[in-house]
Amino acid sequence: MIVLNDINIIQLKGVGATFARNLGKLGIESVYDLLFHLPFRYEDRTRVWPIGGLTGGDTVQLQGVVESCRVVQSRRRSLEVTLADQTGVITLRFYYFNAAQIKAFEKLPVLRVFGEVRLGRNGLEMYHPEYKTIDPDDAPSSDTLTPVYSITEGVTQSKLRGLCEQATKLLAKHPVKDWLPASLRERYAFPEINHAILFLHYPPPEADVSALLAFKHPAQQRFVFEELCAHNLSLLRLRHQFQSHHAHTLLAKPSAGRRSQVEAVIDELPFKMTHAQARVLREIFSDMGSSKPMLRLVQGDVGSGKTIVAALAALRAVENGHQAAIMAPTEILAEQHLQSFSQWLQPLGIHVGWLTGKVKGKKRQALLEDLRSGHYPVLIGTHALFQDDVAFASLALVIVDEQHRFGVHQRLALKEKGAATGYVPHQLIMTATPIPRTLAMSAYADLDTSIIDELPPGRKPVETVVVSEGRRQEVIRRVSLACEQGRQAYWVCTLIEESEALQCQAAEVTFNTLSESLPGLKVALIHGRLSSAEKARIMLDFKEGITDLLVATTVIEVGVDVPNASLIIIENPERLGLAQLHQLRGRVGRGHQDSFCVLMYGVPLSSNSKSRLQVMRESDNGFVIAEKDLELRGPGEVLGTRQTGLMQFKLADLQRDAKWLDEVKDAGALLLKDVTAANAIIRRWLGSKVDYAEV
Ligand code: ADP
Ligand code: MG
């Protein structure tokens, strides 16, 4: 039997070595790959729209006569062509054009154009539409929707369409197997797979156009579901493989009637752990007590008290005679952890090691030596912890704070750090940025989740006000007033400059003007270009109340804990993501007094930004904010670039297709029962380059 996987793309007519290589860049190596390179959207050239009825945002085909054509010089030189039909007028704008084009337009021809309509200052416009001159009596250009494929250099839409014609002929003779179990297909009334493939490459004239354009057609949703399943399965398979290794079994260690060290620290805390903290700690300890490596994500809103939970988990590893490593994304956050951990663990005689990129030379050598000998049961630091030459005597637990900056593969590679002992470390991931459910489903399906859904008692919500920068003087008076009453304040400069040097310069300017306007106050400046010693000193002064007002770049986003600070001003908050704003705002409201956050935006403010700031004013719930952020900005922006590499879907769109996420989760267990099918689905959507064998 011939399978389409075995028919190399080069066997198709018109495909030479170069073209085959270019197709390879799209992940297309066989006829099978080509058939599953499905259109990710369609263009509607089946009808001509009346210009009069258009609104911004539509992508449409129009037909009309050119009424005028002129080169205009506003901010940029452009060619402006006016196109009219019986119902209205639209401007076609070209920033790149040549003399021949102008000449052709000057003949005032009848054009058929295709493009996206924008509503500009001068009415309806299209930038660089596709266009051709036609005979007014020509029939409409197409009676079916035009598929749009993802393409790359050397592979055009029309070439792909040509190939698909050959491929679908082969498909008719050698149908592909449907790996989805019949029970699922029936439950969702998915069309037959071979039919669906053909349908999507060549939607027939009678197809439901609006469903296809909206990507809601059952044939499309079928593959969306399959693709989401593939991603989910690959994460579950990773988890499965990871957990086939052994981890140290870490149990409570009370000795001869004495408390365990974990209990001792809990008893000495100046506060009582919240129910949520205690519950999450139990969940963690239950995982750590197993020889299966833990893979657990702890989510907790800003200030929910994740640090003590992490420290107690580390202590459990230590009292079992092993080591724990804690990695933070920034030096400031790592320093904060160092302080907290030391405060809790030093009294027990536990040494806490420190390693960042700035620890070098002899100091570093000595530290590495002490890690190998086990002198440091706990190590805290940044990414530098996981450089190749950092080896442990017996690493039993890895804690990663703020994991959204850290990909799945990087995370799983940490298992190597336990390699010397033949055990892999347990993994605990902590995130203060609540992860929207939709993202958690797809990016963190390999993790168990614990949520600290309770704040320590006595916290008051931070009152948030949104003002324009025109009210700066008023805001400055407010700072002055708060500080006169013995409170402290943050002033955060969010800057657009790419270069760190320029950012710091700009913060310096703000610092200088604020120092001038507030002569009675002690003002300090902190930014990323300072040495860690300087940063530590500035933070300490602020913590001890020596400084009244701290002007900062966004370096204070995480890890700063000064309960007496009750006011935070954030300049140009519209430049930041909501999760980040929520983090920043979490710097206040840590004490018992009323706290305020002033979001001072620049004008003009777009309507999207306006709604985002509105969310900040109305909610202090990190999860609600994260969901809104996702809605308003999309997953790529929310997760940051590092993570998006993992989130590249061919067809699925997490927001549009959110309704599938729960279904996919349910399907996972079922699909994993048939290993061949599961692997085939993963291979179909993630390609052969995804090799998890090493995990
Ligand atoms: P986050 O979850 O944002 O990392 P932290 O761990 O930094 O929060 O905790 C914030 C502050 O709350 C710290 O000063 C910490 O000591 C304190 N804290 C933690 N748990 C409790 C609790 N149960 N009761 C009172 N204060 C607590
Ligand atoms: Mg924290």
Image (cartoon, grey):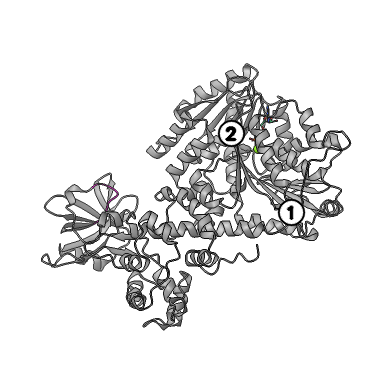
Q: Is mark 2 on a helix, strand or loop?
A: loop
Residue toward you, 535 or 235 = 235
Q: In which quarter of the image is residue 606?
A: top left
Q: Mark 1 points at which residue?
A: 247
Q: In which quarter of the image is the C terminus?
A: bottom right
Q: Mark 2 points at which residue?
A: 453
Rendered location of residue 280, percent (x, y)? 65, 38
Disc 1 or disc 2, which is closer to the eye?
A: 1
Rendered location of residue 395, percent (x, y)? 78, 52
Q: Quadrant of residue 93?
A: bottom left
Question: Which mark, residue 606?
Answer: none
N-terminal-most mark, 1 or 2: 1
Outermost residue, front direction?
183
Residue toward you, 85 or 150 = 150
Q: Quadrant of residue 272?
A: top right
- Can residue 423 be found in the magenta stretch? no
Mark 1 and ligand 2: say if the CB distance to the nearest ligand atom is below 8 Å. Answer: no
Amino acid residing under circle 2: Asp
Amino acid residing under circle 1: Ala
* Relative to 683, 485 lies left or right: right
Category of crowding for the residue at label 2, using alpha-carbon neighbours closer than 10 angstroms: few (below 14), some (14–19), many (at least 20): some
Q: What element carries label 1?
A: loop
Rendered location of residue 535, percent (x, y)? 71, 38
Is any atom of residue 554 visible in this view? yes
Q: In which quarter of the image is the N terminus?
A: bottom left
Q: What stretch is highlighted in magenta?
A: 55-60
